[in-house]
Every structure is written in C-alpha cells, then in structure tokens.
Image (tube, rainbow, N blue to C red):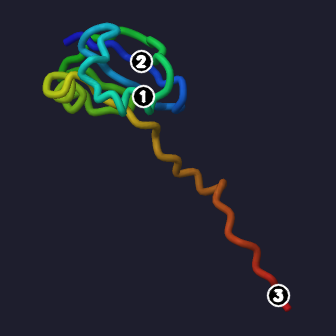
Amino acid sequence: MKSYIYKSRRKDGLYIYLPQKDDFSNMPQALYDSIGQEPIFVMEVSLSPERQLAQEDVNIVMQNLEQQGFHIQMPPVSNNLTTFKEPAKYVD
C-alpha cells in the first residue's frame, strides 16, 4: 500500500499519512485547519505488515488509511525529566 507523508508547518512532530498524494479531502476541515497552512510533503513510502515504522504501528496506519482515508502521527511525548523543575522551597 502506498502512502504519502506530510509534516505540519505549525505543529513540530505532527505528520499526516495519505493514501493519495495531495488529497486531503478525507480529513475533517477543522482538523486540516488546525495543522496550519498547506502541509509540507516529506516522502512516499510503501506500507506492508512486514515494514516497521519509527514511531507508528504500521498495521494501525494501514487500517486508518483504508477506513478513514488518513492517519495522524502525533508528536512524541517528552519524558525528559531534566527539564522538570520543582518550585523553590523557602526555609525560614
């Protein structure tokens, strides 16, 4: 199954998979509007159950492409605990 991958101009790490190049017609308009201006084409890829994707389950991607005509890959959740800071404690 062919898929065409686009990245959002507005949301870093958000990608859209489509079964047909440049055909966003199956995406709800509100969702399309929320990703920003025209998404940027990244690559064409052939999907199969044997293929592994870096951040997505290929079977779910293929199922979403068949059932709803698109797949959204959300940005990864940051688990970097070094950026977490507790509020300062004041000692009298």
Q: Of callouts 3 and 2, which one flags the residue occurring earlier in the amino acid sequence?
A: 2
Residue at mark 1 to residue at mark 3: CA–CA distance: 50 Å
| Mark 2: few/some/many CA within 10 Å (<14, 14-19, 20+) | many
Expressed as whole percent of the image width and height from the top left, the position of residue 29 reads: 33, 27
Left or right: 65 with respect to 40?
A: left
Q: Label 2 amino acid?
A: Tyr
Q: Residue at x 46, y 40 (%)?
A: 76
Kindly indicate whether the residue at mark 2 contacts the one at mark 3 (C-beta within 8 angstroms): no
**Residue density around tag 3, few if under 14, some if 14–19, many if 20 or more, within 10 Å:** few
Mark drawn on residue 33: 1
Query: Which residue position is annotated with label 3?
Result: 91
- Residue at 28%, 14% in the rendered image: 3
Estimate the x, y position of residue 35 in percent, counting from the top left: 45, 29
Q: Is residue 89 left or right of residue 33?
A: right
Judging from the image, what secondary structure is the residue with disc 2 in? Answer: strand
From the viewer's side, name the closer residue of 83 and 66. 66
Which callout, 1 or 3, points to the residue nearer the camera? 1
C-alpha span from label 2 to label 1: 14 Å
Observer-side mark, 2 or 1, equals 1
Mark 2 lies on residue: 6
